[in-house]
Amino acid sequence: MYSIGELSRRTGVKIPTIRYYEQMGLIAAPERSEGNQRRYEKSELERLAFIRHARDLGLSIDSIRDLLALSQHPERPCGEADRIASEHLATVREKIARLKKLEQELERIVACDGNHTVGDCYVIRALADHSMCESEH
Amino acid sequence: MYSIGELSRRTGVKIPTIRYYEQMGLIAAPERSEGNQRRYEKSELERLAFIRHARDLGLSIDSIRDLLALSQHPERPCGEADRIASEHLATVREKIARLKKLEQELERIVACDGNHTVGDCYVIRALADHSMCESEH
DNA sequence: CCTCAAACCTATAGCTTCTGGAGCAATAGA
DNA sequence: TCTATTGCTCCAGAAGCTATAGGTTTGAGG
């Protein structure tokens, strides 16, 4: 049996976050000690590690809830789990693409050498005038 | 003089967002009509376009506030504007790097072909077991 | 056994950047 | 003048936590 602090240390999930996950229904409300403190079993540790890992990978709470529900039914086909991960991969790729455009835009904007005044600063002018952009965004 | 709807159409910033920016102090509270409706001048249109553009580039409200304050003083050196944009560029680059790692991780995870059951699904197992990861995250 | 600091509890508010709805007032075009 | 559209304020919600206040329980040392 772990206390919430112990669980937190072992999974790297902060204490208020664990309580938040309980509220959100990602983990079940655990048993309590006589003094009303949470006492977790090892299975909860594994479940929380799963959640933590999936969050690190950027999956939403909702997606994780779905995946956890799926894992309760090992006999079902796993196409759904695959779909969730694939969709997330697509989102990540989209984000990368968008950020790369921003990177280019910012690189051009930052070409200003700081050796003059705001009046003719390229940063300010570039931000004021969208038509100076080279790509759509 | 533009109404808030007109301003919204011309800048692509939604009406509640314009009011939100006013609340946040990014744009000044404009004159009002007799019936208490907001009436904007052309200068506000430009300012809002600046804000919109900077937001599109992912700059925070706080950074934008700083840049706007700077642009009120065209005689000052523009090193500060440069710094804000450069810092933001660094953040963007970091995000790209992190997302690329996630992309790799997810690519490996998604290699599952969906043709079996959840019990032996690689997606679920990979999420359950951090030690299967190839890189740190 | 007693004490006391550390850990825990609940409830609530705050963060960021908007977005949407309710309920009502003003405006513009026919 | 009528009415559709637009605008007003205020408030709540979304995501995923984080922090604070004010109180209780636990467990280790004396």
Image (tube, coloured by chain):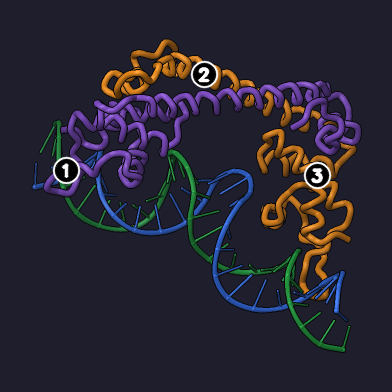
Chain colours: A orange, B purple, C green, D blue
Which secondary structure lies at badge 3?
Answer: helix
Q: Nearer the viewer, mark 1 or mark 2?
A: 2
Few, some or many residues within 10 Å of mark 1 (<14, 14–19, 20+): few
Distance between mark 1 and mark 3 Cα atoms: 55 Å
- Quadrant of residue B55 within the rendered picture: top left
**Amino acid under label 3?**
Ala
Q: As rendered, which of A63 and B97 lies closer to the eye?
A: B97
**Amino acid under label 1?**
Glu
**Amino acid under label 2?**
Glu
Q: Residue at x 84, y 50 (%)?
A: A45
Q: Is residue A24 left or right of residue A42?
A: left
The image shows residue A52, relative to residue B74, as above or below, that is below
Q: Residue at x 46, y 19 (%)?
A: A106
Which secondary structure lies at badge 2?
Answer: helix
* Residue behind mark 2: A103
Q: Nearer the viewer, mark 2 or mark 3?
A: 2
Distance between mark 2 and mark 3 Cα atoms: 34 Å
Q: As rendered, which of B13 and C3 lies closer to the eye?
A: C3
* Residue behind mark 1: B31
Q: Is residue A122 left or right of residue A81?
A: left
* Residues tagged 1 and 3 counted as in contact (Cβ below 8 A): no
Which secondary structure lies at badge 1?
Answer: strand
Give the image location of residue B102, x and y in percent: 71, 26
User: What chain does badge 2 belong to?
Assistant: A
The image shows residue B80, relative to residue B22, as above or below, that is above
